[in-house]
Image: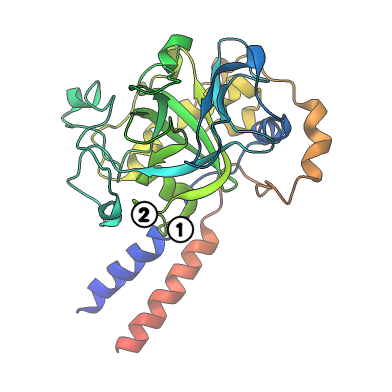
Amino acid sequence: MRHGSVLVAITATLFASQVIGKNVPSALKAFYNKAKRGGDCAGADALQTGFFSTEWSGGHTTYCTKYLPTGKGFYLKGPGLDLANMDIDCDGEQSSGDGRCGSSTDTQGQTRWGLKHPRKHGVRDLNANIHPYVVLGNEGSYSPTFDPRTVGVEPLSIVAVVCGDELVYGVWGDTNGDDNEHPMVGEASLALATACYGSTISGNSGHDEADVLYIAFAGNEAVPARAKWDADSYGAFEESITAQGDRLVAQLFGDKSTVTAGSDPHRTSTSSIDSDSDNSDNDDDNSEHNPKSGDTIRSTIPRVCHIILVVLIALIALA
C-alpha cells in the first residue's frame, strides 16, 4: 500500500471514531436537567403514555410536553430520572456505508417519510449512513399508538437530540411499526448515533442508557428549508440543517448563544422557557450531564493534532 493510501485510510478511520456534535447551550442544558429530574410525565403533560424504551422497561415512557410552551412540540420521557435510550435504525437506502448496518436484523428498504420530499432531489430514500434521522410516532396493530402530526410535528421536521453531552440535529424520518412485542420508542439512524457516540455503534449495538433527550419541534418552521438531501456524507447533510436547528433551539429556550454565524437573529422568539430556577441545579448535576463549557462549537484543534501525530508515526513505521 502506498504511503498516500495509508494516510487517507488512517485519517478516515480516526475521524470516523470521533464524536461529532456541538456543545449544549446553557438554556437547553438547564432544560435537560429539569426534564430529567421532573419525575414521571402524567396528566395534561402527557400526550400519550405506555411506551417501551426497551422490551423490559415496563412501558412507562411518554410523549411529554412538561415544561414546554403549549403547542411547541414534545420530548420522550421515561419514569423517574429516565429520558430515552438510542437504539439503531438502518432502514432506507442501502447503497452506501461502512458495513456497520449489516449486523441489523430488522432492516427495511424504506423509511416512513423518506419517500416524501427527498425524492424530489434525486434521492430514493433516506440513508441511515448519511441522514441523521429520528424514529418518532407509533403505528401498527398494537396499543397505544401515537401520531406526532396530531400535535403539529411535520414529517422530516428537525429534531434536536442531546446525547453524550453533545447537541446533534436530525429529522423525523421514520416511525415505530409493530415488529416488536411492545410499542417501542428511542431509536435513531446509524449516522445520528455515530455523531453522538462514535463508530463503536452498529446496527445491533446502540446506547442503552435512558439519558438521551429528543425534542421534536411543532410547526412548519421546523421543516428544513435548505436540507441537502442528496448529500454524500453525514457532515454535509447535518451542516445544511444546523443553522435552522440553532434558530429553533434559540426560539424555544431563549438562548441566542446557540445561533450559528449567519443565522437570522431577528427570528429568535421571546417565548422562551424560564430556566432561572434550574441554574443552581446545574452545578450539582455534573455527574449526570455536564457539557463542556466554552464556545458553542467544540474546538477541533486537539483532534487535528492527534490525527497528525498518529499519521506521522504510521508513515515513519512504513518508511
Q: Position of residue 23 (x, y in %)?
A: 59, 44
Q: Position of residue 312 (x, y in %)?
A: 40, 79
Q: Quadrant of the N terminus?
A: bottom left
First reached walking from the N terminus: tag 2 or tag 1: 1
Classed neighbour count for the residue bearing mark 2: other residues with Cα under 10 Å, few (<14), some (14–19), many (≥20)? many
Location of residue 177 with respect to 305 vertically, above or below? above
Residue mark closest to the camera, 2 vs 1: 2
Q: Position of residue 317 (x, y in %)?
A: 35, 88
Classed neighbour count for the residue bearing mark 1: other residues with Cα under 10 Å, few (<14), some (14–19), many (≥20)? some
Three-letter amino acid code at the position of disc 2: Ser
Q: Position of residue 238 (x, y in %)?
A: 39, 38
Name the residue tied to disc 1: 18
Q: Is residue 158 visible?
A: yes
Q: In the drawing, does residue 8 fall left or right of residue 168?
A: left
Three-letter amino acid code at the position of disc 1: Gln
Q: Quadrant of the C terminus?
A: bottom left
Residue 205 is drawn in which quadrant?
A: bottom left
Q: Assign a secondary structure to mark 2.
A: loop
Q: CA distance from mark 2 to mark 1?
A: 15 Å
Depth check, front residue: 91 or 290:
91
Name the residue tied to disc 2: 202
